[in-house]
Image (cartoon, helix red, strand yellow):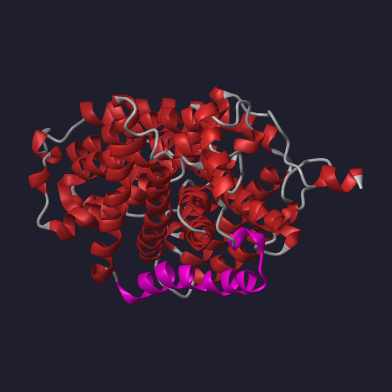
Amino acid sequence: MATQTHEHKLAPNVLGLFESSVMGVAGSAPAYSIAATTGALVAAVGLAGPASLLYCGIAMFGIVFAFNYLGRTESNSGATYAWVRRGLHPALGYIAGWSLIVCSSIFMVAATLPAGQAAIGLFSDKAATSTGWVTLFGAIFFLSMVAAVAFGVTITARVQVIMSTIEVLLLLLFGLLAIFHANPANKFSWSWFSPHAFHGSSAFFAGALSAAFYFWGWDVTANLNEETKGSRKTPGQGAIIGMIVTFLLFEVFTVGSNMLLTSKEIEDNSGNVLSILGQKVWAGNGGKLIVVAVLLSTVATLETQLIQVTRTLFSMGRDGTLAKKFGTTHVKWKTPIVATATITLVSIGLFIGSQFIGSVGKIMADAIAAIGLQICIYYSLAGYSVLVLFRKEIFKNPKNFIFMGLWPLIGAVFMTVMFFKVIPELDAVTKVVGLGAIALGFIPMLWYWSRGHVYFKMPTKAERIAVMHEIEANL
C-alpha cells in the first residue's frame, strides 16, 4: 500500500522562484513564438504588430495576476481545472482543463514543424519546404523531448535554465542587430503602437488572437505548483517574472522586424521568420546562430507543454474524471508516465494527419488560430474565477482592487470578446479543430458526471467558508 501511495505523488519542492521564472519564459518560448507566429501576425495587422502585442499583453497580465491569486487557494497540478470548479462551476472547470489538454496537443504539431523545418534548413533549403521531411524530423525531435520530460522535472528544470539563458541572450543580440541594421525605408514609428493602426475591429482581434499565442505558455508554472517550493505563492510570482521578460522580448523583435523586413519577405518565410532576419543582420554562419535559439526555444516549449498537459491529465486521473491510470506516476522518476505515453501517441497521430492539410505555413496558420480560441476559453474562465473567489477581498485596499479585481476582469472580458469576434473570420478547418476539439470534451465530462463523481458536486457552504479562510491565510 505504501508503494501505491508513493507512485501517485509528484516530486515535491523541486523548483524555486528562479526555476519557476525560467519555466515561465520557456513556456512562452520567445524565439519559437517569433519564428512561427510573426507571419500570421503580419498577415493580420501589417505593421501594427507591436500594437497587437501591447494591447493583448495588457489583457494577458490580468490573467497572469488572476493565476497568481488563484494559486493561493489550492496547490493542484490541474490548475484551472481545479480553480475554475471552485470559483464558477464543476462543468466549467472540466472544460477549462480539457481546453488546455487539446490546445497543448495541437501545439505539439505547431511547435515541432518549425523545429523540423529549422533543423533541415541548416543543411538543405529545398528539404525544408517539404511537409513530409519536416514532419519526420519534427517527430524525431518531439520523441527526444518526451524522453527528457519522462525522466523527471529536476532534470528538465536544469536543462531549461541552460537553454533559456542562451536563447534570451541570442534574442537580445539579434534584436538589437535588427534595429541597428534597419532598412532606411522602414523608419521606426510610434504609430505602430497606436490603437488607430488597425483597419477595423476585425483586424484588431485577429492580431490579438495571434498575440495571445505569442504569450501563451507562461502558466506552466501553475501546473508545476505541486513540485514547487512555496507552492501557494512561488508559481504565481514566477509567471509574472516570465511574462515581463517575454513581453519585452516580443516587442523588441516585432519592432526590429518592422524596421528590417518587408511584408513580402515575412510572407515568403512565414514558417521561420528568424532565419531570414538572422541572415540580414549577420550573413553566413553567424546568422544561423538565431536558428539555434529557435531550436532551443522549441525544445523548451515542447517540454513545458508536455508538463502542462501531462500534469493536467494526472490531476484529472487522480480525481477519477478521466481514466484513473492517468493519475499514476513512475515509482522512480515521479512523473505521470501513463499520461506522457498517451499524449505521445496522440501527437504522433496528429503529425501524420498534418501532412494531409497542406503546406507548413498553412498548418501553422490553422494551428495558431485554433489554439488561440482554446486559450481564450480557459484564460477567461480563470479571470472570472478569481473575481468570485476573492470577492470579499477585492475592495479592502487599492492593490487588491487593481490586481485581484479590475485587471483580471479586463483580461477575462478581453479574452471573451476576442473569442466571439474572431470566430466568423476563421475558415472551416480552424473552426472544426478549434471548437470541435473542445466539444469532444463534453463526452467524457457527461460520462463521469452521470456516474455521480464527487468532482461534479458543487462545493457546500461549509467548504466555501473553509476556502475563504484558506484564502485569507495565504494573502
Percent x, y for residue 243? 39, 33
The residue drawn where x is 50% and y is 52% is 120
Does the stretch in magenta take in 436? yes
- Name the residue rendered at 60%, 38% in the picture: 75
As for residue 103 lying within the magenta part, the answer is no
Residue 10 horizontal side relative to residue 422, left or right: right
Q: Position of residue 172 (x, y in %)?
A: 36, 26
- Judging depth in this view, the residue of 384 and 100 nearest the camera is 384
Q: Quadrant of residue 60?
A: top left
Range shown magenta: 427-456
**Secondary structure mainly formed by the magenta segment:** helix
Residue 35 relative to residue 13: left or right? left
182 vs 76, nearest the viewer? 76
One can see residue 279 in this view = no
Residue placed most toward the observer, 189 or 293: 189
Residue nearest the viewer, comparing 249 with 446: 446
Q: Position of residue 159 (x, y in %)?
A: 62, 32
- Give the percent coordinates (x, y) of residue 457: 59, 61
| Residue 190 visible to an observer of this rendering | yes
Q: Residue at x 60, y 52 (%)?
A: 312
Query: How many numbered markers are drawn?
Result: 0
Q: Residue furthest right?
A: 1
